[in-house]
Amino acid sequence: MQQITLKGRTIVEGLCTAKTLVSATPLSFLGGVDPTNGKIIEKNHNLYGKTIKNKVLCFPHGHGSTVGSYILYSLARKNLAPKAIINQTADPVVVVGAIIAEIPMIDQIDIKKIKTGDIIEVDAYNGVVRILNRTKS
Amino acid sequence: MYLTKEEERLYDGEYGWANQTCMKILVRLGELFNASKLIPIESAHISGVSYKTLGDAPVEFLQALANADGKAKVKATLNPQSFDPDYFSKKLPEHICKKQLNILEQFEKMGCIMSLTCTPYNIEKPRQGSHLAWAESSAVVHANSVLGAWTNRQGGPSALASAIIGKTPDYGMHRAENRQPNILVDVETALKNEAEFGALGIFLGKILGDNIPLIQGLRDVSDEKLKQLGAALATTGMTNMFHHNTRLKRKEMEKVSVEAKDLEKTVESLSTTLNAKPDLVFVGCPHCSINEIREIARLVDCEKVKAETEFWVCTSRYIKEKAKEEIKKIEKWGGHVLADMCTIVSWTEMLGINTIMTNSAKTAYYAPTLNKAETIFAPLKHCLKTISEG
């Protein structure tokens, strides 16, 4: 029995353990996340209505306006931000957002291997993600 | 990425939180795009100024930076805000005006120049070959393609970080090898006016990806027409630069032909209504140059009665000061020459504007979503004719 470990690249350093929220599609923070409550409001998004607060938010990459970076900062100030961000491919909007909001972030992770509700440990000092509630035999 | 001793100290926070945060933004973006180092910039141009597009969230970050002594080290100009205070202050709710003012105050504290224009190059041209960190996609394409300056397409936050550090990572358009054309565009039809230059940009942006085109067959070219082409190119595509009418053809390139029917279809697609009566006729996206103001003043006939339709000409405050006589003539004719603002990031729907006629392909493309308005796309002369005929 072995824990599932995924190796990626550190964007913003940090360490946390939390439940995941996984999006199969890209996410825009401007217009896609309500800055007053941290809920996903992008129409037709598979996570519509879900809150990103205190989750490890996993999505392929960001899209949309660079104002999105500021939204992440504002969410963090109101304690509505995700605990960590995991991307397949980091894009400038999310990278800048995670830096100014001081949210641990790793990219180059195959997020298809992570399921919503998994408990994962994000070691964004070493660029490593460990899925704690599942083991591979 | 290589950092000097001084840059490392900034990164480690020895010069405070504002410098550290900005340094982190530049270094991480640099690493993302394989930059080797930071290079000094001549100027930064910052987007994300209009309260309408920003909303409430960004103000907190701007305030934090300003309060932590974030100060621009190089010339830092600003994109337009959401209204011209001289014209709108009584037409808009007070809380909106206050919030917009608060955003401007934060930028002012950080030492930004209150240029409030998308054409900072009409105030002062960047030097040829100089490195810039400009946001505002239309200005980026114009700087790279027409002015010979070098800049990536920055976002609002990274342009601000570059202003405060005075540097930018050296990837992308800052390297000569990335500025060569890699696709040949043959324009097989004569473009008749500035609107058709814009339509060409909309058409090409959709098919070019992030390729750099060498556009051949453009005739009767002016900086103003190329401004329309570049603004539209950046609206629908990722292209940051075009070359035009140069004979240098160093290698075999993929070729794309643009025929008359391609252009006609694009022009048609930029009008959403057949209604010939707009609530607003708008020129000045991107902001009018002094030549364009003169052209409009020449075309408006003072004998005509004051028009019923709202007519806006947007430009920078700097140009407005330079063209007082021309502006008097346009205003006498019934037009409003507005400064500091951009129609597509302003509150047109609050003023009851449902149909916008414009010669700007960029505005025609964005107005249905950003202004919830129908569009009529036509060249300047046609726009003016519509006003005078009522």
Image (cartoon, rainbow, N blue to C red):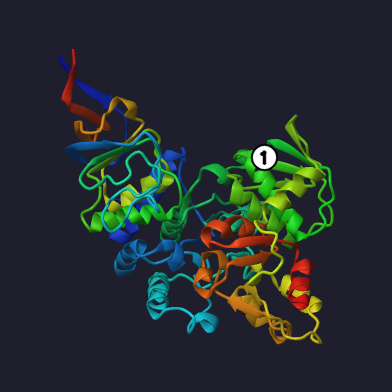
Q: In this view, does A90 lie above or below B279?
A: above
Q: Residue B45 at what x, y percent from top left?
A: 52, 62
On screen, residue B265 versus residue B237, left or right, reads: right
Q: Residue B334 at what x, y percent from top left?
A: 69, 83
Nearest the viewer among B65 and B266 is B266
Residue extending farthest to the top is A137
Query: In the rendered structure, the residue with mark 1 lies on which chain?
Result: B
Residue extending farthest to the front is B275
Q: Is residue A55 above or below residue A128?
A: below
Check the picture and name the quadrant holding the N terminus of chain B. Answer: top left
Nearest the viewer among B150 and B338 is B338
Q: Residue at x 73, y 84 (%)?
A: B333
Label 1 SS: loop
Q: Residue B153 at what x, y percent from top left?
A: 54, 50
Nearest the viewer among A29 and B386 is B386
Check the picture and name the quadrant holding the C terminus of chain B. Answer: bottom right
Q: Label 1 belongs to which residue?
A: B180
Q: Is residue A133 visible?
A: yes
Residue B311: image quadrant is bottom right
- Numbered marks: total: 1
Q: Is residue B81 visible?
A: no
Q: Is residue A9 above or below residue B347?
A: above
The amino acid pointed to by label 1 is Gln
Residue B282: image quadrant is bottom right
Q: Which residue is drawn at 73% across and 52% down?
A: B267
Q: Which residue is drawn at 20% across and 54% down?
A: A79
Nearest the viewer among B321 and B269 is B269
Crowdedness near tag 1: few (<14), some (14–19) or many (≥20) residues, C-alpha within 10 Å: some
Q: Residue B66 at what x, y percent from top left?
A: 34, 68
